[in-house]
Image (cartoon, coloured by chain):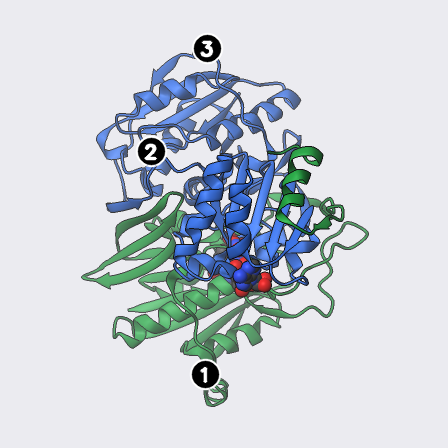
Amino acid sequence: MKLLVPIKRVVDFTVKVRVKPDGSGVDLENVKMSMNPFDEIAVEEAIRLKERGLANEIIVVSLGPAACQETLRTALAMGADRAVLVETDAELEPLAVAKLLKQIVAKEEPQLVILGKQAIDDDSNQTGQMLAALLDWPQGTFASKLEIAEGKATVTREIDGGLETLELPLPAVITTDLRLNEPRYTSLPNIIKAKKRPLDTLKISDLQTDIAPRSKTQKVGAPQPRKAGIRVNSVEELVTKLREEAKVI
Amino acid sequence: MALLVLAEHDNATLKPATQNSVAAARKIGEKADTSEIHVLVIGHQAVPVAEAAARIEGVAKVILADEVELGPQTAEILTAQVLLQLQAEHYSHLLAPATTYGKNVLPRIAAKLDVQQISGIIDVLSPSTFVRPIYAGNALATVESIAGAIIVLTVLSTGFDASPLRETSAPIESAKELAKDSAGVRLVGRQLASSDKIELTAARVVVSGGRGLQKAENFQLLEALAAKLNAAVGASRAAVDAGFVPNDYQVGQTGKIVAPELYIAVGISGAIQHLAGMRDSKVIVAINKDPDAPIFQVADYGLVGDALEILPQLTAQL
Ligand SMILES: Cc1cc2nc3c(=O)[nH]c(=O)nc-3n(C[C@H](O)[C@H](O)[C@H](O)COP(=O)(O)OP(=O)(O)OC[C@H]3O[C@@H](n4cnc5c(N)ncnc54)[C@H](O)[C@@H]3O)c2cc1C
Ligand SMILES: Nc1ncnc2c1ncn2[C@@H]1O[C@H](COP(=O)(O)O)[C@@H](O)[C@H]1O
């Protein structure tokens, strides 16, 4: 079984981004970039499936600028077999990403696509569900446990209120939640080995799909800052403040 | 053309987030030439849900699709049923709560319609222009939908006060056609926390615990405080990962987003991802033994000290 794992290069999760004064976006100059954390979990899950003998090839794919090669190399160092970069400097909406991924799925014919549930930059939480729709495949989103057996995926999902378990016939789309696994670190020997693994580059035009934008970001602004608060010195003082000043209890 | 809101429910009760989505639809309606709002209830033996939805202020009609196959409410069957409704009547907008329910199904529908969904809106500027947080709420994007037959939105409850329930009811219609195809997906089961728990996203007061509470048993101190304040209990990711509390307690960028009147963060450091879920609370209290913890930068009232000592004192004084 082949596994496809789409990974996005995003601002590192430790960075607090700043909005550009002209409202055109956030400032990404000299900001640390990393693999989207949910996608690291997706890569890890794919590797574990392979280690358990349930898969034989893991293809990672990223859509974005040339710098995404670095992210793909990280995934190869973790244990992916092969990488595909769809190189573009264009801003892609989740629908466009899903359409391009659909073309890659048609070429590679994986049995399972594992994505992150959410990219921590756009916070869209859409691409996996959209890809499943376009492929007419079943979806198991926000997975915290995944089992594969007899042509079926059994997925435990994190939902409001608790957990839900679904059984999906393969091929299927899975998106990862935080509790699915803890991604491994890459070791130096594996990073060196990864340099020899294939990384193919495609252009958007190779994939022949309509990715005309359907939405437009007019402006990016900063949220209201919170006004500075105070320190209280005792529980008594806290209770008094909450009662008499804030009037919330 | 009307606006369609997909109701969130568990076949027995309507989830309050639906009322916030109706509120968003009303705000769009005020700015558009149409303001008729329909609510679609899809499930099995869900008549009480439809009755509750019919009482939401601003709702003109409820459509109930009720059938055993629809009971599990998987993304696949919900999508099929919503698409039938969109064929039966014309709608300008489709909305659902930005909860795990709406996040799961709405993008699937949007893709079928070749539409770019706008996720997690917190404000409506025009019938096609919306505000949504990005980068863990560190930026707010104004996004316009520029193409597509319909506008598809998920709604963050924190952005819109729930549309209230009224005495009178809107009419309830049965869906003319029912979806059958669940794409072979089978619901094996659900493990849900007891339903008497106060809903995090609807609570007036939230008390949340982090890794600083050190072990699951210590969450009882937080539960006791919550009981006194009639509060919902939340947590940081670290507390969930450590197994102190179930996953759906997680407040944050990738968990639940809350904005109560009062948020009390106990033993939580204040990582960007946590702040994303609570920074719009009206009053924030932080209790942490580290005077330099970043949570104090957003707190209206900060108390430095050991949570395990402070919590029982605080509960006793309320
Ligand atoms: C992709 C991604 C998504 C994430 N999503 C979320 C999310 O949605 N929500 C979320 O919360 N986090 C999220 N995180 C995790 C986030 O980055 C932090 O790791 C997490 O919020 C830390 O939790 P914490 O504050 O409980 O733990 P810590 O950062 O370990 O802080 C514990 C705090 O407790 C204090 N403390 C210790 N003992 C005591 C005591 N006895 N009394 C009082 N105080 C004490 C310490 O001083 C410290 O400040 C996410 C991370 C990633 C990478
Ligand atoms: N440009 C991209 N390249 C590769 N994968 C992506 C890209 N954008 C989104 N994805 C995948 O889709 C998931 C969800 O992203 P989003 O819908 O944008 O929140 C991510 O976790 C990735 O797995």
Residue most extreme to the left: A150
Residue plotted at (35% across, 32% down) = B81
Q: Secondary structure at mark 3?
A: loop
Residue B181 percent location from the top left of the image:
26, 38
In which quadrant of the rendered view does residue B147 lie? Answer: top right
Colour assigned to chain A in the rendering is green
Q: At 68% across and 39% down in the image, what residue appears?
A: A241
Q: Is mark 1 within 8 Å of ligand 2?
A: no
Chain to which the residue tagged by mark 3 belongs? B
Instruction: Judge the density around disc 2: few (<14), some (14-19), many (≥20) Cα neighbours within 10 Å.
Output: some
| Any part of residue A206 in sight | no
Q: Nearer the viewer, mark 1 or mark 3?
A: 3
Instruction: Chain letter for mark 2, please.
Output: B
| Looking at the image, residue B167 lies above or below residue A11 | above
Q: Residue furthest top?
A: B168
Give the residue number, with chain letter if any, for mark 1: A197
Q: Is residue A232 left or right of residue A109?
A: right
- Let me know if marks 1 and 3 both belong to one chain: no
Label 1 lies in what chain?
A: A
Could you say whether the residue bearing mark 2 is in a helix, strand or loop? loop
Which amino acid type is shown beneath numbered disc 2?
Answer: Asp
Question: What color does chain B have in the rendering?
Answer: blue
Q: CA distance from mark 2 to mark 1?
A: 48 Å
The answer to whether marks 2 and 3 sit on the same chain is yes
Q: Quadrant of residue A121?
A: bottom right
Disc 2: which residue: B10
Residue B167 numbered mark, or none: 3
